[in-house]
Structure formats: C-alpha cells, structure tokens
Image (cartoon, grey):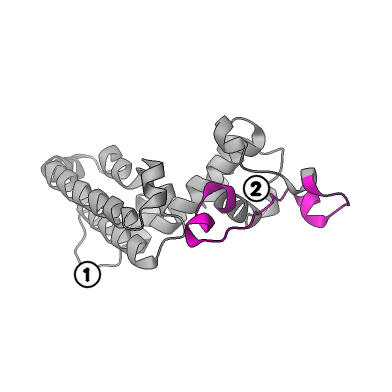
Amino acid sequence: MLNTINHCPYSTVVLVSHCCTRTHFTKSQLEFTVMQYLYSSKMNLNLNPTQMTFDYCNVVLYGTSTAVTRRLQVGLNAAARMVVGIGKYEHITPVLRDTLHWLPVTAKIQFKIAALTFDCVRGTGPVYLKQVICPVSDLARQSLRSAGRGDLFVSRANTSIGHRSFSIAAPVVWNALPLDLCSSHISHRQFRSKLKT
C-alpha cells in the first residue's frame, strides 16, 4: 500500500476520503451506544474505533497540503463533538486537548513520526526504518554542534514526494525537538508523554 501511495498523486486524497467515510460510518454506528455511555459514566468511555480510524496510516500524510489535513481535522472535530455531546458551533479545541486528550491531525502525524524515530535512534525500531536514518555524528569528520545534540542527517530530495519520505521527514521532525526529548536518559514512556504536551 505504501508503494501505491508514493507513486500516485491522488492517493492521499483517496486515503483521506476513505478515512472520513469510514469515520462517518463508525460515528453513525456508535452514536446511540456512545450517548448511553455519556449519560451513565463520562470517564469510562472507550473511544478506540474513532481514534483508530483517524490514526490509520496517517504518517503518509506528512507534508501534504493543508486542504487534505483540514478535511481529516473536520472529521475528528465532528467525532469529538459527538462523543462529548456539544453543539456544532461550540469551540472544540479545548475539548480535544483537555477532555479527550486528542492531538490535532498535523500534530498527531508529527507525534507518530517522532515516536518512530525515537525507537529507531534507540535501536528498538523496525530494521527497514533504522537503515534510512543516520546520526550526524556518524558522518562528520570534524566535531559539529549538531553531532553533539544528537541530530540526524537530513538527506536531499529532488521531488516533493521525496520530502515526504521517512528518510527526510524523520530527521526534520527529530532535529526540531527540544534537547531534553532527544536525551539518551529519557524512557519511551517519558518521551511520549512529554512529546504530547
């Protein structure tokens, strides 16, 4: 599926359309059940089907246009409104952040790339992803500040699709993180919790 996405310019639009359609179907299926749970116990609500639909393969949307990610954000906002039970014109950002602890779509994409990169840097990630990233310290013949910070080498790409590949997206996202998140002393759980806030 990833090869198809990289070679077809319309595939990101198709992926987003599928996700929004599936979310609407999931929303209409779950609406009655969710509303019963909302009135009985707000905190014990399990939202996995909605979140899984939006999390599916969204890393491939890194670097796409804002129109594509905006469409997913509208679907996520609608699902959050349905889950919490607020009106269409009420402000949704505080609900996403404070009540549901959901990240916006663009932040979720960067979160997943950063988490995968963290695993690769620590040596616990998939082998095929570990092979495409390289620390600056391995390439530098002289001492560089970026090597001391633990930055990753950002290779060049000639196309816009190339800029969206993991070998370029991972170092760009990783190098933009604060120094305390790139520390070798931080655990996986601490990394994810600090990255989400």
Q: Which of these two is toward me, 51 or 7?
A: 7
Q: Are marks 1 and 2 in contact (CB under 8 Å)?
A: no
The 10 Å Cα crowd at callout 2, few under 14, some 14 to 19, many 20 or more, is some
With 72 as the anchor, is 6 left or right in this view?
A: right
| Left or right of residue 176, residue 142 in this image | right
Pointer 1: residues within 10 angstroms few (<14), some, or many (20+)?
Answer: few
How far from the left and from the top, in percent, is residue 125? Answer: 57, 33
Circle nearer the viewer, 1 or 2: 2
Q: Residue at x 31, y 57 (%)?
A: 10
For the point 17% across and 47% down, which residue is it?
27
Quadrant in which residue 128 is drawn? top right
Q: Position of residue 116 (x, y in %)?
A: 54, 40
Query: Dot 1: what SS?
Result: loop
Q: Is residue 53 magenta?
A: no
Report the residue that reaches farthest toward the bottom: 89
167 left or right of 53 in image? right
| SS type, badge 2 | helix
Residue stretch rendered in magenta on the structure:
139-168
Label placed on residue 195: none
Residue 80: x percent and y percent? 27, 53
Query: Label 1 to label 2, Cα distance in Å?
Result: 37 Å
Q: Is residue 73 above or below residue 151?
A: below
In this orientation, which residue lies closer to the viewer: 72 or 68?
A: 68
Q: Amino acid at mark 2?
A: Leu
Residue 188: tell me if it is visible: yes
Q: Which residue is mark 1?
A: 89
User: Which residue is disc 2 drawn over?
Assistant: 181
Q: On the image, which quarter does residue 49 sit in?
A: top left
**Quarter-of-image position of residue 146:** bottom right
Nearer-N-terminus badge (1/2): 1
| Residue 149 belongs to magenta span | yes
